[in-house]
Amino acid sequence: MNKILLSAAIAMAAFASNSQAFTGNGTAGIAVIGLSDNVPTVPHPATIQDTGVNLNISSAVFTNSVSGDFASIPSPAGTAVVMNTPETFNPTPPETVGEIASWNFTSSLGDFVATSIIDVSNPATPTVLSIQVDGTFTGAGALAGLVATDSAAIWSFTQTGTSVSGSGTFDEVAPVIPPTSVPEPSGLALMAVGAAVLAFRKKQAA
């Protein structure tokens, strides 16, 4: 009986030692190797930011630029990231269910299911399209047991002449996009009153 209990204890200890405790916080770079597109060519006045684009990421891999949970496992560099091609981005929201789903990906380390797309491009650089795709990542292989329900894949695509290059970063914790600040009506009224008072004082001083 004691031998049976000892064997069970050893088995449980072995199982515990093989299990991985994940923090739910980690990042991994994504290198886009194969990419084709329908982006307008120069000298077309439109740029990648203001036209709907279809991107076909035929080949992508995780890189060795990792942190957190991705750094706690054997190097994921070179692990294939298989996209649900073609990827579609429409600069006029809302995105359709199909457009969002086009950014899903699978890998031997886990699968990502997109739930929304946010345009985080900088208007000052119209030839660079940056989007944040939020969703859920379910780990597999070395990351089995990891479920990140608020994760994101951040993609950046640069238009250079007639070609487009891209890269990405997967983040287990989706960055928070600050909302655009719009003054409330009461705030606008106070600003108007303040401006009037300032103008009156300047007139008196004159």
Image (spheres, rainbow, N blue to C red):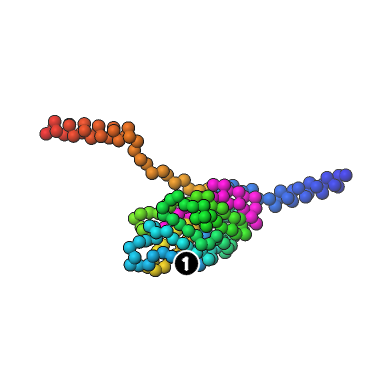
Which quarter of the rendering shows the N terminus?
Answer: top right
Residue range in magenta is 128-154
Which secondary structure is most common in the magenta stretch? strand
- Residue 163 coordinates in the image, percent (x, y): 41, 68
> In what element is the residue under mark 1?
strand
Q: Is residue 26 left or right of residue 53?
A: right
Q: Is residue 161 above or below residue 20?
A: below
Q: Quadrant of residue 75?
A: bottom right
Residue, x 55% and y 63% (percent of image)?
Answer: 61
Q: Looking at this view, name the residue that lies furthest to the left.
A: 206
Residue 184 visible, this orientation? yes
Residue, x 82% and y 47% (percent of image)?
Answer: 6
- Residue 37 coordinates in the image, percent (x, y): 45, 65
Residue 64 visible, this orientation? no
Q: Is residue 131 magenta?
A: yes
Q: Is residue 119 above or below residue 35?
A: above
**Closer-to-camera residue (195/185):** 185
Q: Is residue 30 magenta?
A: no
Question: Disc 1 marks which residue?
Answer: 36
Could you tell me the amino acid type at mark 1?
Ser
